[in-house]
Image: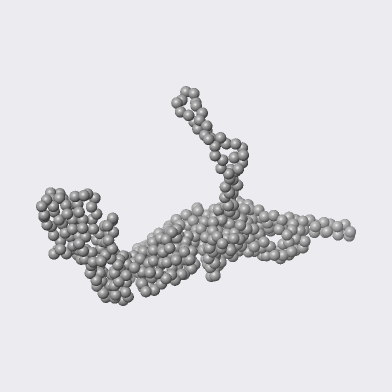
């Protein structure tokens, strides 16, 4: 009896040691993602029952390109984390993405449809063969009545017509389904070829004095995600503020779909080295000239000593990205901006980019129209935003909308040093500008050996909008580059005249439905016998 008890106790101890030495597979769920311009910090949560003693927990099905130096593991419960490491699992394949699963389901669906329709075609073929094999009517002793022959012929004709028509329809469906099946198969092969057959794992060694239910939070950085800012510029009318909507154009290729994940978009860069640069002393000495025998030149060699070499030594930059602990200041917003999205989002892996709205600002703007009728009669609307630095804009492409109509694209460059940000909003057909030659004021005259050409233009502008507008009209007169050519402006209707460049500018205030005219007349004198080209 005593021997049996010792044997049972030995078996229990052996089983307990075996269980303790077996790695525990832990499945975690993605909860949060802080996405940088290039890269992302991901946060996962998991629950696990940890036995007493020292155990090894393996967090499975993780991206392959995890930055090992950024891994952090936090646990709640009566246990101690001893070590954390990252490794690659070559034996198990990662879970397929949602896009691959959907394509596989579609592939099976069209495959079943094709097989079913081909079977139906086979049935039609056999029925047609059966009708062809039973065409003889009546017997050898009794002839065939006309009525019976007519009925049989009608039946055969009608049934064969139905078989041929149905066969044609089914054959067309088979061809269409075959084309869809081929396209889906091609897309699926492309996605499968891009997907990795390996996956990453994080191994955590813990110690617990007794069995405990623990909650774990795993954070790490990956380089397979990012975002770039894009804008929507919307102007309902020129008497309203400019609406500037900032959006994140986000992507991720981690191999795992992000479902119901809380997203934060950050302008930080985890790859940058956080150590500030430090100058060293700069010692200046005379260059020594050393003559080299056999050559007619001298080489200049500057003296360096060991003291200077040591002073110039810089702290080496790391080759890996920073860990999550280095982002405390980034989260405080001292250096970067963060946009926390309150609504959970779905971001599939390897799919198209997703656009997430981040921030909407209503900017007071000054609207003015600009037109150069000599080149183009269309008036271009320009919005000027003063003190734009307070909005901390990011560089990015912008889609322009005016009065609900898409006008095109522009680029917002916050690197400009002016206090006013100018945004071109495209053409407005409600501002009508015409430039017409004044024939009664355009002439050529001769005096002695000098020729004078006079050119006159009338510029009319009409405002067809329901609000007053400011219109800047720009024209020009030629600038002489020779002493024998004299240019003089005779009439410019109060315009500003830049003599050096020859530009003439009017600034008009146009009320609704108002039309104004301006006149530009200039003359050019030059020696007779010479030729010049004017408008």
Which residue is situated farthest in the right direction here? 2
Q: Is residue 378 left or right of residue 27?
A: left
Residue appearing at x 63%, y 58% in the figure: 325
Residue 427 visible to the viewer: no
Residue 236 drawn above or below residue 444? below
Residue 528 x %, y %: 13, 50
Residue 24 x %, y %: 69, 58
Q: Is residue 65 left or right of residue 122?
A: right
Q: Nearer the viewer, residue 411 or 504?
A: 504
Residue appearing at x 74%, y 58% in the figure: 207
Residue appearing at x 74%, y 57% in the figure: 54
Q: Nearer the viewer, residue 254 or 383?
A: 383
Which corner quadrant holds the N terminus?
bottom right
Q: Quadrant of residue 469?
A: bottom left
Residue appearing at x 80%, y 57% in the figure: 13
Residue 382 x %, y %: 35, 66
Q: Quadrant of residue 172?
A: bottom left
Which corner quadrant holds the C terminus?
bottom left
Residue 74 x %, y %: 67, 61
Q: Is residue 213 left or right of residue 238?
A: right
């Amino acid at each position: 009896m005593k021997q049996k008890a010792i044997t049972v106790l030995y078996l229990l101890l052996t089983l307990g040691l075996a269980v303790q030495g077996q790695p525990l597979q832990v499945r975690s769920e993605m909860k949060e993602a802080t996405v940088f311009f290039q890269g992302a910090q991901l946060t996962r949560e998991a629950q696990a029952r940890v036995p007493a003693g020292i155990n090894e927990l393996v967090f499975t099905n993780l991206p392959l390109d995890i930055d090992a130096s950024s891994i952090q593991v936090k646990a709640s419960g009566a246990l101690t984390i001893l070590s954390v490491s990252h490794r690659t699992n070559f034996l198990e394949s990662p879970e397929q993405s949602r896009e691959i699963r959907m394509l596989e389901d579609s592939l099976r669906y069209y495959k079943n449809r094709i097989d079913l329709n081909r079977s139906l075609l086979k049935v039609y073929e056999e029925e047609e063969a059966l009708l062809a094999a039973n065409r003889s009517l009546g017997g050898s002793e009794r002839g065939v009545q006309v009525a019976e022959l007519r009925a049989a012929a009608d039946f055969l004709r009608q049934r064969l017509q139905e078989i041929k028509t149905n066969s044609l329809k089914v054959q067309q469906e088979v061809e269409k389904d075959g084309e869809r099946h081929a396209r889906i198969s091609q897309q699926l092969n492309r996605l499968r070829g891009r997907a990795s057959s390996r996956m990453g794992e994080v191994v955590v060694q813990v110690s617990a004095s007794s069995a405990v239910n623990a909650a774990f939070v795993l954070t790490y950085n990956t380089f397979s995600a990012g975002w770039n800012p894009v804008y929507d510029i919307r102007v309902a009318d020129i008497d309203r503020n400019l609406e500037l909507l900032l959006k994140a154009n986000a992507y991720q290729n981690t191999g795992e779909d992000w479902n119901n994940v809380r997203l934060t978009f950050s302008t930080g860069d985890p790859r940058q080295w956080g150590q500030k640069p430090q100058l060293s002393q700069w010692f200046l000495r005379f260059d020594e000239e050393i003559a080299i025998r056999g050559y007619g030149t001298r080489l200049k060699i500057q003296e360096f000593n060991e003291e200077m070499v040591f002073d110039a030594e810089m702290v080496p930059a790391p080759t890996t990205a920073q860990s999550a602990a280095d982002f405390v200041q980034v989260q405080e917003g001292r250096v970067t901006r963060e946009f926390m999205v309150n609504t959970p989002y779905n971001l599939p892996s390897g799919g198209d980019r997703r656009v997430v709205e981040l921030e909407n600002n209503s900017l007071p703007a000054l609207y003015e129209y600009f037109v150069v009728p000599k080149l183009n009669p269309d008036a271009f609307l320009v919005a000027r935003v003063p003190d734009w630095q307070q909005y901390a804009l990011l560089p990015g492409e912008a889609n322009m909308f005016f009065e609900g109509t898409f006008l095109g694209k522009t680029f917002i460059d916050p690197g400009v040093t002016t206090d006013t940000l100018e945004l071109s909003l495209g053409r407005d057909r409600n501002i009508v500008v015409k430039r017409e030659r004044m024939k009664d004021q355009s002439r050529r005259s001769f005096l002695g050996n000098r020729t004078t050409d006079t050119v006159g233009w009338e510029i009319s502008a009409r405002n067809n909008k329901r609000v007053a507008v400011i219109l800047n009209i720009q024209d020009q007169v030629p600038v002489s580059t020779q002493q024998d050519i004299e240019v003089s402006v005779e009439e410019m209707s109060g315009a500003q005249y830049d003599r050096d460049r020859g530009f003439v500018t009017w600034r008009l205030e146009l009320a609704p439905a108002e039309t104004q005219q301006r006149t530009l007349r200039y003359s050019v004198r030059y020696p007779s016998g010479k030729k010049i080209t004017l408008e």
